[in-house]
Image (cartoon, helix red, strand yellow):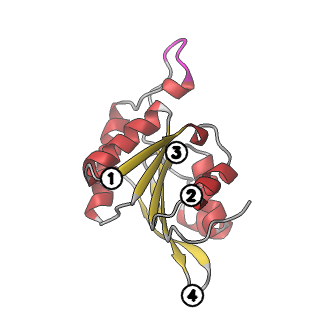
Amino acid sequence: MTVPLPPPNRIYLLRHAEAAWADPGQRDFDRPLNEKGFGGAEIIADKAADKGYRPDLVISSTALRCRDTAGAVHRAMGVALDVLYVDALYNATVDTYLEIVDAQDEAAVMLVGHNPTMEQTLEALIGQEAMVGALPGGFPTAGLAVVDYDASAAVWRLADFVIV
C-alpha cells in the first residue's frame, strides 16, 4: 500500500449517508438512501460548504447511495463542481481508493464511498492511533474526514471530521 503524496494537498473522505435496506431481489448496489440518509446527505454537504470545504473534484462510487450523497454535495457547492463516477470504488480495497486519489492533479479531491474501505483509507493516511483517537466508534454514515498534507512533517493529518 502506497500512501499518496501531493497533489492533492487535501483529501475529503465522505462515507455515503444512511441507505435503505434492500427490497427483496434488489442488488446491494441499487440501494438508495433512506429518508434519514437523504436528510443527512444534505446536512453534511451544507455543513461542508459552510466551512469552506470545497473540493476541486468529487469522485464517487457508482452505487446509488453514493451517487445520491454526491448529488447533495453537488447541489450544496454549485454546478461548477466536477463529479466523476467510478465503478472501481464499489467493493474496492483501500489500495484502490489510494490509487484513485494519487492519480489526481487537483489540489483538493473528495471521495464518496463505502465502509469499511473509507475507514481503512483514513487509517492508511493518518495512522491507526490518530484514527482510533478521532473516531473511536468508527466512521459514521455521512461522516466527512478532511485530511491535509503537512509538508513540514511529510505526513497526512486529520484537520477536521464533520458529522450530521
- State the SS at label 3: strand
Q: Position of residue 5 (x, y in %)?
A: 61, 71
Q: Which segment did they paint magenta?
A: 23-27
Q: Which of the labelled discs sits on residue 113, or is there none? A: 3
Q: Residues within 10 Å of mark 4 (few under 14, many from 20)?
A: few
In the rendered structure, which disc, 4 or 1, sits on the residue that comes first in sequence?
A: 1
In the figure, residue 157 lies in which quadrant?
Answer: bottom right
Name which residue type carries label 4: Ser
Instruction: Calculate the distance from the C-alpha at mark 4 to the C-alpha at mark 2.
Output: 21 Å
In the rendered structure, which disc, 3 or 1, sits on the residue that comes first in sequence?
A: 1
- State the SS at label 4: loop
- State the SS at label 2: helix
Q: Nearer the viewer, mark 3 or mark 2?
A: 2
Q: Circle 1 is placed at which residue position?
A: 81
- State the SS at label 1: loop
- Look at the magenta stretch and give its main secondary structure: loop
Instruction: Calculate the distance from the C-alpha at mark 3 to the C-alpha at mark 1.
Output: 18 Å
Q: Circle 4 is placed at which residue position?
A: 152
Q: Circle 2 is placed at which residue position?
A: 101
Name which residue type carries label 2: Val
Name which residue type carries label 1: Leu
Q: Position of residue 100 (x, y in %)?
A: 59, 53
In the rendered structure, which disc, 4 or 2, sits on the residue that comes first in sequence?
A: 2
Rendered view: 98 above or below 32:
below
Instruction: Calculate the distance from the C-alpha at mark 4 to the C-alpha at mark 1.
Output: 30 Å
Spot the residue most to the front.
Answer: 105
Nearer to me, 83 or 27 = 83
Whether residue 18 appears in this view of the structure is no
Asked if the residues shown at circle 4 and circle 3 are in contact, with their CB atoms under 8 angstroms apart, the answer is: no
Q: Residue at x 39, y 41 (%)?
A: 69
